Image (spheres, rainbow, N blue to C red):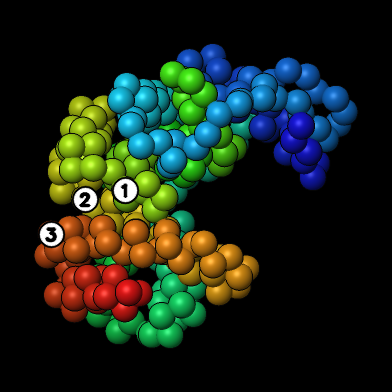
Amino acid sequence: MISFDSKEDRERFVAITRFLVSKKVPVPGILSLDDDQAVITEFVEGGLFSAEKKSGHLFAEVLRVAGIFAGISPGTVPANYKVNSLDIDRLRFEMNYFFLNFCSSYLCEKPSEKVKESVYKLTEDLGRAPAVFAHRDYHSENIMVAGNSIFVVDYQDALMAPRCYDFASLYVDGYRKPSPNEKKRILAAALTATGADPAEFMKTSLQRALKALGTFGYQVMHRKKERYGKAAVLTAGYLDELATDETLSDPSAVDFARSIKKKLT
């Protein structure tokens, strides 16, 4: 059973759940609405995709579902589900969150203005990219495995986002490191599903990694959840590949991003 703070929140959740079911997205279906602020959904008995050692066909299914999200027209979303947008302002907010909660609080380091300006330019580039409907947090701990099937959870914040966003979330997953072959498959699936080029995908992946580090920093420093420190180290490991002169406009920003893993380990 899921409880909500208000009837409006519950109706919004019910609307997006039923909509995703209609689009063949594998989410737990709604069984009943008990009262004004509760919902009973299907129980999924299984584990997290992050714990899967042999992904097999499951990985192909994970990519297929990301493509379903990207192919949803926002005009078809129910009227009582307000579709928010991960636009330039929100992308910039996320980078400020990274500077505050990861750099200043977690690393005890203040990035230079050149570093900040380069990261802000990254958000401007992504903000101008075509947007698609996205899960918003599509990683291996929001994907359940039940037998030979997957179920997607934590989708209530789905919104419009840069078109590679869900695929990028898999590429820089903080809970399950994709193999080299899986990374190739993620990139190929993203380009096929969205029409983006590799440079746009890499920029999206870099932004997503920095955003995740901001979240992990907040969880460790302010909520005292030490397990997110491990996720931060894994995520920082992606920056050697992603921080380049093609994704960041200033060499000092490239150096700063690439130095993060060493500082954590």
Amino acid type at mark 3: Glu
Is 35 left, or right, of 79 in this rendering?
Answer: right
Q: Position of residue 65 (x, y in %)?
A: 39, 25
Q: Between tags 1 and 3, which lies in front?
A: 1
Q: Give whichever of discs 1 and 2 has the lower sequence position.
A: 1
The front one of 112 and 121 is: 112
Residue name at image x 52 percent, y 34 percent: 47
Is 18 left, or right, of 86 in this rendering?
Answer: right
The front one of 39 and 10 is: 39
Residue at mark 1 to residue at mark 2: CA–CA distance = 16 Å
Query: Is 124 drawn above or below residue 49 in the view shown?
Result: below
Query: Is 2 drawn above or below residue 22 in the view shown?
Result: below
Picture quadrant of residue 57: top left
Residue name at image x 23 percent, y 30 percent: 189
- What secondary structure is found at the residue carrying circle 1? loop
Do the CB atoms of the residues marked 2 and 3 lie less than 8 Å apart? yes
Q: Give whichever of discs 1 and 3 has the lower sequence position.
A: 1
Q: Position of residue 82 (x, y in %)?
A: 60, 36
Residue name at image x 31 percent, y 48 percent: 177
Picture quadrant of residue 198: top left
Furthest residue toward right:
35
Query: Is 178 drawn above or below residue 94 in the view shown?
Result: above
Amino acid type at mark 1: Lys
Residue at mark 2 to residue at mark 3: CA–CA distance = 9 Å
The residue tagged 2 is 202
Is 229 left, or right, of 234 in this rendering?
Answer: right
Is 183 left, or right, of 212 in this rendering?
Answer: left
The residue tagged 3 is 246
Amino acid type at mark 2: Met
Residue name at image x 34 percent, y 59 percent: 234
